[in-house]
Image (cartoon, rainbow, N blue to C red):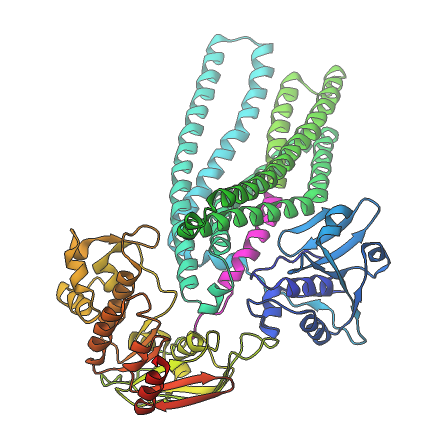
Amino acid sequence: MTPVVIQSESAECGLACLAMVAGTYGRRIDIATLRDHFPVSARGTSLKAIIEFAAQLQLHARAYRCDLDALRELQMPCILHWNMNHYIVLVRASERGMTIHDPLCGRRQVSWREASEAFTGIALCLEPMVGFSRGDERRRMRLDTLFSGVAPLRQSLMLVFACSLVLQCLQVALPLLLKITVDELVALPSSHLLLTVAAIFAALQVMIFLVTLARSWVVTYVSAKLANRWTGDVVAHLFGLPLTFFEKRGVSDVMSRLGGIAVIQRTLSTGFVETMIDGLTAIVVLSLMFAYNWSLALVSLSALVIYMALRAIGYGRQRDLINGHIVAQSKQQGHLIESLRAMLSLKANAHEEIRAVQWSALQGESANEEMRVARFRASTVACSQLVFGLERIVTITLATTFVWQQAMTVGLLVAFLAYRDMLSLRLGSLVDRFFEFRMLRVYADRLGEIVMAEPEPRHFVAHEMSEQPASIEVNGVDFTFGPADPHVLRGVTFAVTPGESVAIVGPSGCGKSTLLKLMLGLLTPSTGSIRIDGRLVQEFDPRRLRAMVGAVMQDDHLLSGTIAQNIAMFDPAATSHEVEKAAQAAGAIGFVKALPLGFDTLVGELGSSLSGGQKQRIILARALYRKPRMLLLDEATSHLDSRSEAEVNTSIARLRITRIIVAHRPETIRSADRVVELAGAADISVSRRKLTAMITAEGQ
C-alpha cells in the first residue's frame, strides 16, 4: 500500500513523492531524512533532479510523455507532473477517475475532467533496483518527549489519578447498592431501611459531585500548565532554528503546526489518566458481569469487538480527512495573512475584491473539509449508538429470559444492566481514545518538523571580543541554494581592513544580499571561507557574532511597539540617552521629536503612519544602537532623498566601524573607500579614485 507523505516546505513535493513511492516498495523514509540527503531550494525540483535522487535511493526511473488514456497502462504508483508546478503520485486509475496522493493535502479522488486540466503529460515510473534496501528509516517525534516538563506537576497528576479512581469506585458501588435495594426492599418492605438506603444514595451522589468538581479544577490547572510549558519550549526551539527554515515555509504553515500542540495537550493531559482509569474500571466491571452471567457478558464484549473493527476500518479515512482539513485551513489563513501584509498593493491596484473572492473560495474549501471531518465523526457516533444499542436490546432480551427461568433475580438484572451501561460507556470511550491517541500521530508528525529540526549551532567557548573595528576576509566563496540550482556566488574573494568602508555593487540577482547573509552566519558557504578578525564565521556563537555586527537588510521590519522600543530592540536596560544617540547617528532624531509622542509613538508592521524613509532611518538606528564593530547595510538608504541620504552617509562615515554597503545609488557608492563589484564568476575591487572617475563618467 502506498503511504501518504505530506510536504513540509513549499517546494519539496518531489521529495514527498519519492518518499511515497519508496514506501510502497518497503523503504519507509520520512521527508526530513530525504531533505538532509537531497537538499532542495525554494525554487523547486526539476524532473532531472528527481531522477538523480531516485537513483541514489536505488529506484530505477523511466520518464514518459503520454496522454491521459495511456496512464492506465503505466506501472503504479508513478509520479505525475501536475499543474505545471507540482508533483503528485498516481496510485490507481479507473473508469471513474484517478486516486492520487497529493503532497499538499493527502489522498483524494480526481475526475478525468479535472485530471485533463492538471496533468501536463509527463509521468515518471519507478521500480526497485537490484539490492534495493527495505526497512523503516523514519525519524519520528516521540510524544513522550513532551513530558519532560511534567515532573513539577507530578503531585497534581497523582491527585487527578486519585480523584478519578475514587470517582470510579463510587460509580461501581452504585449498582451493587441498587441490587440490594431491589432484592431486599421489594421482598421485605421497610420504610426505615428505605430511608437509610436513600440517605446512602444521596451521600454517594454528593461525594461524586465533590470529587468530580475537585478533579475538574486540578485537570484545568494541569492543562494550563502543560500548555504553557509545551508551547513555550517549542516556540523557544523554533526561534533558535536557522533562517533557511523560515524562508522555505509560510507563516500560516508554521502557525498551523504550532496549533497541533493544543490538540496534543488536550488529548494527553486529561485523556491519558482517564484512559487508565476507564481501563481499570472496565476490567472490574467486566469481571463482575462475568461473575453474574458469563453469556450476557460475552454479548457486551462482542459489541466492543465489532465497534473497534469499524473504527479500525475507518481510521485511514479519518486521518486523510483531518490532514486535508489542516492543509485547507492553513492555505486560507496564509492567503489572509498575505493579503493583510500586501493591502497597500491591493488597494493601489484595485485588486482587493478579486483577492477577497479568492480568499472566499479557500474559506469555502476549508469549510467543506471541516464538514467532511464533522460528518465522519457524526457517522462514528451513530455507529457507536447502533452497535451498543443493538447490544443493549440483545442483553435485555436474554436477561429477561434468564429472570423468567429464575436464573437471575430482578435485583441482579437491574445491577447487571447498570454495569452493562457503565461498561458500554467505558469501552466506547476506550476505543475512541485509542484512535484519538493514534490520530495524534498526524499532529505529532507535523509538529515534529519543528521539534526535530536542527537549531543553529551554539558555541559557548569564551573568546575575548575586541571593541576595535572588525576586519573581514572572503576567500573563494561559492554558494548555491541546492545541488541542482545554479551558483548564486562563485569564487568571491576580497578583504576589508578594520574601519574601511566598502561598497558591494553588481546587477540585481548577482548575490549581494546573499553575501551579507553569509557574513552574518545566516547562511553557510557551499565552498570557501569567511573570516572575521581571522576566525571563521562558523566558529563564532551566532548570537555573539550578530551582537557585534549591526545589519540593515532589505526585508527588515518594525515590530509592534514604540519607536524607542524598536530602536533598542526591546532591550529592558535601554536608556533614553542611548536611544537618542542612535537616532541622531541615523538622522532620525529630527522627525521623531517632531511627532506628538516623540519616541513613544506607536509603530508596527501593519499599522504605521511613517514613510518608507522614516522607517529605514529607525531600522538604521536600531543597527547602530548596539555600538557594532561592523555595519552591514543592504540598500539601507534607498527610500531617502539625495540630501537625506548624503547626511546619513556622512554621519555613518564618522563612526569608527567597518562598513560594508550594498547599494545601487551613486551617492551611497561615492561615500565608500572602495568598491567590490560582483560580476559573473569574478569579483573586481575598485579604488576610490577609479570609483570617482566611474561615477563621473556614468553621470556624464
Tell me if 360 is positioned left or right of 317 in this view: left
Query: Which image quarter is the C terminus in?
Result: bottom left
Tell me if 678 is positioned left or right of 371 in this view: left
Q: Is residue 659 above or below residue 186?
A: below
Which of the two residues, 572 or 271, is positioned nearer the viewer here? 572
Queried whether the magenta region covers residue 447, the answer comes back as yes
Quadrant of the rendered structure where residue 290 is? top right
Q: Main SS of the magenta segment? A: helix
Which of the two residues, 565 or 544, is positioned nearer the viewer here? 565
For the point 21% across and 77% down, the residue is 650
Residue lying furthest right = 73
Quadrant of the rendered structure where residue 306 is? top right
Is residue 475 visible in the rendered structure shown here?
Answer: no
Q: Is residue 626 above or below residue 313?
A: below
The residue segment tinted magenta is: 433-457
Tell me if 125 is positioned left or right of 14 in this view: right
For the point 59% across and 30% down, the residue is 422
Quadrant of the rendered structure where residue 637 is? bottom left
Is residue 662 visible in the rendered structure shown here?
Answer: yes
Which of the two residues, 81 or 395, is positioned nearer the viewer here? 81
For the point 72% across and 39% down, the residue is 310
Queried whether the magenta region covers residue 576, the answer comes back as no
